[in-house]
Structures are given as C-alpha cells and as structure tokens.
Amino acid sequence: RVLFRSVSGLTVRSRHVGVQIGAALKSLVGGELTGITKQLAETRQQAIERLVENAQALGANAVLAMRFDSNEIGGMYQEILAYGTACVIEAQS
C-alpha cells in the first residue's frame, strides 16, 4: 500500500487586545514581544495538530516536508497553515 497525499491544517485567530496593548508599550523600549511570540507559538501548534488529524484520517503514519505559511488578514487576524505530504512508512522485512 502506497499513500502520498497533500494534507494541511489551518487555523485563523484574532489578535488578543491585551497582547496588542502590551506589544505597543514594549515597542517603545524595544525587545521581544513575548505575548505575541506565545500567541503565535500556540497558533502554530494548533495548525500542526490539525495537520496530524487530517493525515491520520487518510490512514497516514507520517508527514513529509511539513512547512508553515502565515498571513495577516485585515490587520486583525493571523492565519497559520501547516502543510505537507501525508504518507505511510512501513518497515521492510
């Protein structure tokens, strides 16, 4: 059995008002915007989880060449897409 199918996981999140205010204040003095970093890391993790769910639904046990794509929508939303090639990897006997 051979399976190679394109698979993806998508999430779109609104920006947290508190995080945005904190980022605006932090930008005055410089440094990492930890609130935004945390929010984006959580969003990426959710996209990966959806990618894995979609791959498993196809019967895959691996995803090759996984990548991320991101986009800002209207300055208010962040879209993260995780995508790759779902496949079945079996040990040779």
Image (spheres, rainbow, N blue to C red):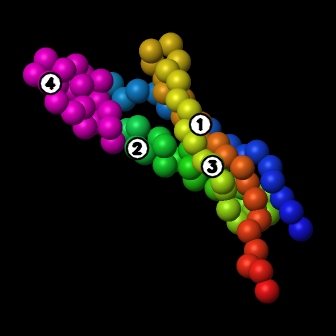
Q: Secondary structure at mark 4?
A: loop
- Mark 1 is surrounded, within 10 Å at the Cα level, by few (under 14), some (14 to 19) or many (20 or more) other residues, namely many
Disc 2 crowd rating (10 Å Cα; few below 14, some 14-19, many 20+) is few
For the residue marked with disc 1, what is the amino acid? Leu
Magenta: main secondary structure equals helix
Q: Amino acid at mark 2?
A: Ala
For the point 76% across and 74% down, which residue is it? 90
Are dots 3 and 2 in contact, CB under 8 Å? no
Q: Earlier in the sequence, mark 4 or mark 3?
A: 4
Residue type at tag 4: Gly
Q: In the rendered image, which residue does mark 2 sit on?
A: 41
40 sits to left or right of 68? left
Compare marks 1 and 3 and give the one earlier in the sequence.
3
Q: Nearer the viewer, mark 4 or mark 3?
A: 3
Q: CA distance from mark 4 to mark 2?
A: 20 Å
The Cα atoms of the two marked residues, 1 and 4, are separated by: 29 Å
Q: Secondary structure at mark 2?
A: helix
Q: Along the polypeptide, which appears first: circle 3 or circle 2?
A: 2
Q: Give the extent of the magenta segment.
A: 18-38
